[in-house]
Amino acid sequence: MDKLRIDKWLWAARFYKTRSLAVEELDKGRICINGQEVKPSREVKTGDTLTLRQGPLTRTLVVRGISSQRGPAPVAQQLYEETAESLALKAKAAEQRHLTSDPASSLEHGRPTKRDRRSLDKAQGKDWDSRWSASIN
């Protein structure tokens, strides 16, 4: 086997969990083979250069093997080789994420817990006893 549909190869190489997710990304134009946007039925062969956009990261890969079966991750990683420029960009993006702070950590007060809500209600004079009830008493 020297050629395989690109959606099957992306699934077998473990870039996407299902073939339908791979097809969606191909239809959105986020995957290129040798610089051209492709359809899911396009065949990929060894030596082709793939460009994948995954979130903010763009990965450039060279196809090294063809497999129509989805196997374990170590086997799937042998199907492609990532270029040096792509690895450098990946490392730079990881360092950038590491240096920036998490937006959630800047929040001082989040949503109150049940205990906090009860103490707030008591402080404002709202108590379960003083609320309207549908009972006859």
Image (spheres, rainbow, N blue to C red):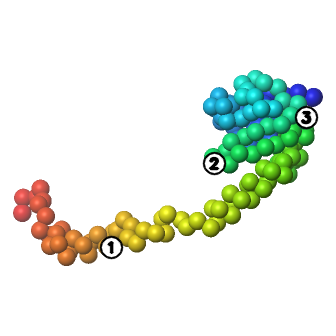
- Quadrant of the frame with the N terminus: top right
Which residue type carries mark 3?
Thr
Q: Position of residue 123 (x, y in %)?
A: 19, 76
- Tell me the kind of residue under disc 1: Arg
Dividing the picture into quadrants, the one containing residue 107 is bottom left
What residue did someone put label 3 on? 46
40 left or right, relative to 28: right
Mark 2 residue element = loop
Q: Is residue 119 above or below residue 90?
A: below
Residue 17 makes an appearance in the image = no
Residue 137 in the image: state x and y as whole percent.
6, 63
Element marked by disc 3: loop
Q: Residue at x 90, y 35 (%)?
A: 47
Q: Which callout, 2 or 1, points at the residue further toward the start of the chain?
A: 2
Above or below, 104 against 33 in this view is: below
> Which of these two is toward me, 62 or 14?
62
11 relative to 80 in the view: left or right: left
Q: Secondary structure at mark 1?
A: helix
> Disc 3 to disc 2, how far (Cα)?
27 Å
Mark 2 Cα within 10 Å, few/some/many (few <14, many 20+)?
few
Mark sitting earlier along the chain (1/3): 3
| Residue farthest along the right direction in this orientation | 1
For this orientation, the residue located farthest to the left is 137
The one of 127 and 47 positioned closer to us in this rendering: 47
Q: Is residue 115 above or below residue 71?
A: below
Residue position marked by numbered label 2 in the rendering: 56
Q: Disc 1 to disc 3, how far (Cα)?
A: 61 Å
Q: Residue at x 12, y 56 (%)?
A: 134
